[in-house]
Image (cartoon, rainbow, N blue to C red):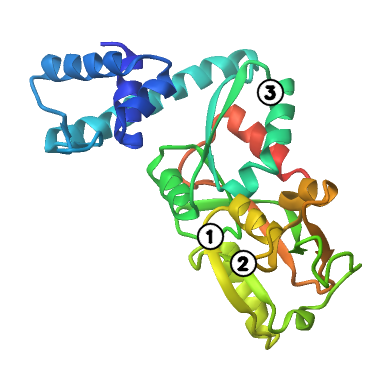
């Protein structure tokens, strides 16, 4: 049995999909199936069950135990590699990072490129997900780091804060607010708005600021994806408030009008989260340092 087989197994459990596990490990779905059958034959236990009518899988009771111990073996192997690299001061290995779309698409690419240039022997494995999934994956050890907007303190997690973003108003190019140099919160009273869904931290922050300022807007749509929100505003659904980095290019291209909001409370905190009880790899430490550099 090879360490790569354990990784294929744990990836399959975490991704809950054969094709995704195959893609992550650069092998075929058939190879994934063969490796799983090999594990089951070796230990004479059924580890996984397919969900009838779907491609998803679930763990058997024996599989639960095997998954837990396989994660421990992989963690120990990673620690072994890290210890050997530290002897010669080499920064290498893979840092698994989960992030939300609004941060990952518009703020992390430049940082990842900078990191890879500085440490060519290291790799950033970046995944996109919703906030609740990012937190869960960090806590369960599926990923080493999570990058979130409005990170909330939570037992067992450490937060390393990144530079804050300004939140800005976006409008269609022909809206009455388009081209304004700035606006105040009270100017938005009664306007049609396109929002994030209610469980998204940025939406919660926007709702809170509106409430604190006694401003009511008209909700016309809710989406879970920042790109969909931008497109909805572009075609005239209404206005929205988003982090400035995520709308910079659309503003420059004239697809949207980007209007600053003058009050100090229109800022978005961003942070890196990781488990407090685990020692970060050298590569992860370097990436966190790069992200949090003011």
Q: Are marks 2 and 1 in contact (CB under 8 Å)?
A: yes
Binning the other alpha carbons within 10 Å of mark 2 as few (below 14), some (14 to 19) or many (20 upward) gives many
Residue 8 appears anywhere in the view = yes
Q: Is 291 drawn above or below residue 74 in the view shown?
A: below
**Residue depicted at 21% across the width and 30% down the height:** 66
Q: Secondary structure at mark 1?
A: strand
Residue 99, image quadrant: top right
* Residue 223 picture location, percent across and down: 53, 60
Binning the other alpha carbons within 10 Å of mark 1 as few (below 14), some (14 to 19) or many (20 upward) gives some
Q: Earlier in the sequence, mark 3 or mark 1?
A: 3
* Residue 142 picture location, percent across and down: 41, 37
* Residue 82 picture location, percent across and down: 52, 21
Q: Are marks 2 and 3 in contact (CB under 8 Å)?
A: no
Q: Nearer the viewer, residue 280 or 139?
A: 139
**Residue depicted at 76% across the width and 79% down the height:** 185
Residue 75, image quadrant: top left
The N terminus lies in which quarter of the figure? top left
**Residue depicted at 79% across the width and 81% down the height:** 187
Q: Which mark is residue 11?
A: none
Residue 72 appears anywhere in the view = no
Q: Secondary structure at mark 3?
A: helix
Q: Which mark is residue 223?
A: 1
Q: Label 3, on which residue?
A: 116
């Amino acid at each position: 049995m090879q360490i790569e087989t354990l990784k294929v197994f744990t990836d399959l459990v975490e991704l809950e999909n054969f094709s995704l596990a195959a893609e992550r490990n650069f092998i075929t779905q058939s190879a994934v199936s063969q490796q799983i059958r090999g594990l089951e034959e070796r230990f004479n236990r059924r580890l996984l069950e397919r969900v009838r009518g779907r491609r998803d899988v679930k763990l058997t009771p024996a599989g639960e135990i095997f998954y837990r111990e396989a994660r421990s073996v992989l963690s120990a192997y990673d620690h072994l590699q890290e210890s050997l690299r530290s002897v010669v001061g080499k920064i290498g290995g893979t840092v698994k990072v989960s992030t939300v779309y609004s941060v990952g698409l518009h703020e992390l690419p430049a940082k990842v490129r900078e990191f890879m240039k500085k440490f060519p022997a290291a790799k950033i494995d970046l995944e996109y997900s919703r906030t609740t999934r990012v937190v869960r994956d960090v806590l369960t050890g599926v990923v080493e780091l999570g990058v979130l907007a409005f990170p909330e303190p939570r037992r067992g997690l450490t937060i390393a804060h990144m530079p804050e973003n300004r939140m800005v108003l976006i409008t269609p190019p022909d809206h009455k607010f388009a081209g304004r140099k700035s606006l105040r919160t009270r100017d938005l009273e009664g306007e049609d708005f396109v929002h994030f869904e209610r469980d998204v931290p940025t939406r919660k922050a926007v709702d809170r600021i509106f409430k604190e300022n006694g401003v009511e807007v008209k909700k016309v749509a809710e989406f879970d994806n920042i790109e969909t929100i931008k497109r909805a505003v572009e075609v005239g659904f209404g206005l929205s408030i988003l982090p400035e980095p995520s709308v910079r290019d659309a503003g420059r291209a004239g697809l949207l009008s980007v209007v600053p909001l003058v009050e100090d409370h229109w800022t978005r905190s961003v942070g890196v989260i990781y488990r407090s009880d685990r020692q970060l790899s050298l590569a992860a430490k370097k990436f966190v340092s790069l992200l949090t550099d003011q």
